[in-house]
Amino acid sequence: MKKLPKYLLRWDKVDGEPDLVSGVFEIDPHNNCYRSYEKPGKEIKNRQHAYDHFTYENLVEGYGFTPIENNQLPSALEAWDYYLGFISWTSRNDGHGGAKGGTLWEYTQYLQRVEEFNKEHPNWREERDKRNGDNKI
């Protein structure tokens, strides 16, 4: 039997941009199928086993998943966090029961503005909390 890779990446194309990592899957040792990666420290008690149809062949050949080496996991998780941040940002509330949406380019511009603000105001959280007193947000 062929040794299966421990991790697979799921890809998503956003705004015609290069593929983004939209998921990291890990092998389930109980049935040699794959399930969503569980970050250390966030373990789920009584986690269910991977679905039987989440096989290597099905995910790679049928859905375009890509195997990665163990040493590629940290960068894959970082890319996945970026993707999840983008999805969260695009689905933020518009105040009228919908979502604001946005492009990947707009998201990168937003991240740059946040970074610049944090550099200019490194203690903004403490200042806010001091200003709000007991009414911390």
Image (cartoon, rainbow, N blue to C red):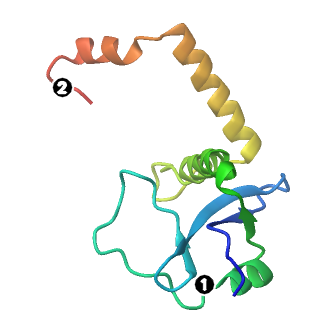
Q: Secondary structure at mark 1?
A: loop
Residue 135 higher or lower than 87, as above or below: above
What amino acid type is highlighted by mark number 2? Asn
- Residue at the location (22% across, 26% down)? 136
115 displayed left or right of 72? left
Q: Which residue sits at x=76%, y=40%?
A: 105
- Give the left or right position of residue 101, taking residue 45 as reference: right
Count of picture labels:
2
What percent of the width, then of the height, locates residue 67?
Answer: 73, 66
**Secondary structure beneath disc 2?**
loop
How would you rate the neighbour count of disc 2 (Cα within 10 Å): few for under 14, some for 14-19, many for 20 or more?
A: few
Query: For the view shown, which residue lies furthest in the bottom direction?
Result: 52
**Residue pictured at 67% horizontal, 76% vertical:** 4
Q: Quadrant of the C terminus?
A: top left
Q: Where, by quadrant of the figure, is residue 52 drawn?
A: bottom right
Residue 66, position as x, y percentages in the image: 76, 67
**Quadrant in which the N terminus is drawn:** bottom right
Q: Residue placed at 50% from the left, 76% from the top?
A: 28
Q: Which residue is mark 1?
A: 54
Quarter where residue 126 is shown: top left
Name, please, the residue furthest toward the front: 1
The disc labelled 1 sits on which kind of residue?
A: Phe
Q: Front-most of 75 and 131?
A: 75
Counting from the top left corner in percent of width and height, residue 127 is at 33, 11
Q: Earlier in the sequence, mark 2 or mark 1?
A: 1
Residue identifier under label 2: 135
Q: What percent of the width, then of the height, locates residue 60?
A: 75, 78
Name the mark nearer the viewer: 2 or 1. 1
Find the distance from the CA under tag 2 to the CA under tag 1: 48 Å
